[in-house]
Image (cartoon, rainbow, N blue to C red):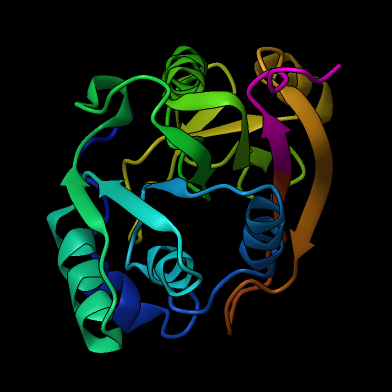
Amino acid sequence: MAETRGWDWDRALGEMPGRWTETAGELRLFADLAAREGARRVYDIGCGAGRHTAYLAMRGFEVTASDVSPSALEHTRRILADAGLSARLLRSDIRRSPLVAATFDAVVAFNVVYHATRPEVEAVLDAVASLLTAGGLLLITFKSTLDDDCGRGRQLAPMTWAPVSGIEAGIAHYYADEAEVRRLMAPFEIVSLVLKQEFPPVPGTDRWRAHWVVVARAGRAPGQG
């Protein structure tokens, strides 16, 4: 995305222990859906410290995971090794991915795609669509305009701001309302779209966090519709 250095995950895990190591409930439900539909190959974009990569591998999926942050990949390798699990790990920006088109039955992009400007978000969604098989599943999140950080920090582009301090200083955040999310997801068939609000997100903070959580398909599978 616009910021390609990624997070310092040693710092992130030190400042927010637990927040980035627990499997999100939305991911568990998505894995259930993917399993029911016979998905085998799953791509975890922006794997961070590896919480979802490890969960998907534990569920028996053939997992590929990528991040632009070296520390993210190191933490992911460690969590996989400690659990006796395996996954293919790549240091890669999805817009310049070495992966082959129509490779994956499911893609996870959890709290990652919105670290960009709108044109970059569109480019990522195009890349995701190319990597999914027909009817393949996608779990993706977007920052909502209801998030308390919307409009705060340094504006980089329309509806895009970067915090000026903290672990995300300088990293772009693109905010969208429901209509905008639906426009962005036009190449896909939306299965569900839910607004998730959290308060407080971490101890000692008093701001709302708001994300759109979307499950979608890359068109319809052969023989459907």
Q: Is residue 49 left or right of residue 178?
A: left
Give the residue displayed 43% in from the left and 37% down from the top.
115
* The N terminus sits in image quarter: top left
Give the residue displayed 43% in from the left and 15% down from the top.
123
Give the residue displayed 74% in from the left and 71% down from the top.
199
Give the residue displayed 25% in from the left and 28% down from the top.
99
Q: Is residue 212 left or right of residue 88?
A: right
Query: Which quadrant would residue 150 be assigned to in this image?
Result: top right
Q: Is residue 134 left or right of residue 144?
A: left
Where are the magenta residues, as a range? 214-225
Locate residue 55, reporting x and y percent. 47, 72
Whether residue 223 is in magenta: the answer is yes
In the rendered view, tell whether residue 10 sits above or below residue 126. below
In the rendered view, tell whether residue 14 sits above or below residue 72. below
* The C terminus sits in image quarter: top right
Whether residue 6 is in magenta: the answer is no
